[in-house]
Amino acid sequence: MKRRSLLSLLLASSAGAALAGGRWSTGGAGSPRSRSVLVLLELRGGNDGLNTLAPIADPLYRQARPTLALDGGEALPLVAGLALHPALAPLLPLWQSQRLAFALGVGWPRPNRSHFKAADQWATASPSGEGSGWLAAALDQRQQPGPLLALGPAGCPAMEGGKALALQLSSAELRGRPGAGFDPAEAGANAVLRQMLALEQAGMQQLQRLRRELAPLPPGLAIPRGALGQQVALALRLIGSGACPPVLQLAQGGYDTHVGQAVRHGRVLSELATALAALTTGLERLPNRPAVTLLAVSEFGRRLRENGSRGTDHGSASVALLLGEQLPNRLIGRYPSLSDLDERGDLIPSLSPPDLYRQVLQRVGV
């Protein structure tokens, strides 16, 4: 358990009311199963939504990106005017079976272009970037006990600041021996330290329980190499255990494509697609699996115009990706206009992060 999480648990108050209510705006919340798991996947660095789901028929797209615009012969048409990056081809069967959806134009008006500040805004569902994490607040609002479990290498601020334990478990930690835990009595008369040690002890006990209950991977399942593949494997073992926490987090880096974007972006999107395809195949092979919904977001999109290094700089609106069973609509929101830009030359968002979060939380019942 991270020290930052402990301090947040002791000092932060709930901000769940801001995320209460709301509906899946594209046609009803559906009927979630009695057990559900929400997986948050953070695409760190600022994913270029314009080349993830490209406005392939818009001439302004090609004018603004003379070397980076997707080749119309290689891009994968989805609906009129929009095409998927060819590296995401492993996800096409999910699109065709209505298990893949895209939220369009997601972002903050005039977002902060600092990675750290923008990540805080997304984590807290607040333009100020301050307060409890949105996932922590949601569990508090709905009085769900948690824990919230981060599988990414750097934890998850969206899970911190609430009453539920925010824990971190990595594949590397599974290979080590469980820790001995902490004795709150060692704090003596220091009440704050005693409470911190008690929370650390509770977190250690939860992690040890989760390690004991991990299920084996489905036989014959091919897990792609790399950090994201390892996280997917661990997520499947947790989900298959029957005792999975209600919220998991995964993370993938490499999306800050200022230079040589064509190769770099294609590589990380390929890693993303193969990992998500493996996750879906693994879920299909799990007996009595819970309903699983995955939301993939990034801290901001990229600029419309490519730069002089054949890359793109920090921008605003992007796309978010959702995976689930029988999603009510495969496109949520509207694609930003390439001709109506803000005063900084950025795309104008049409769907705010809090609105997206509300719809996802309503769907999964978290």
Image (cartoon, grey):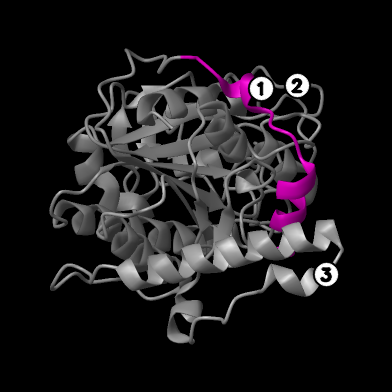
Give the mark nearest the N terminus, 1 or 3: 3
Residue displayed at 57% across by 29% down: 106
Q: Secondary structure at mark 1?
A: loop
Q: For the C terminus, which image quadrant?
A: top left
Q: Secondary structure at mark 3?
A: loop
The type of residue carrying mark 3 is Gly
Q: Describe residue 169's horizontal placement relative to residue 192 as left or right.
A: left
Q: Nearer the viewer, residue 118 or 303?
A: 118
Does 350 sit above or below residue 138?
above
Q: Which residue is mark 2?
A: 342
The type of residue carrying mark 2 is Asp
Residue displayed at 74% across by 34% down: 13
Q: Which residue is mark 1?
A: 348
Disc 3: CA contacts within 10 A as few (<14), some (14-19) or many (>=20): few
Give the mark nearest the N terminus, 1 or 2: 2
Majority secondary structure of the magenta segment? Answer: helix
Q: Which residues are magenta?
A: 2-22
Q: For the N terminus, which image quadrant?
A: bottom right
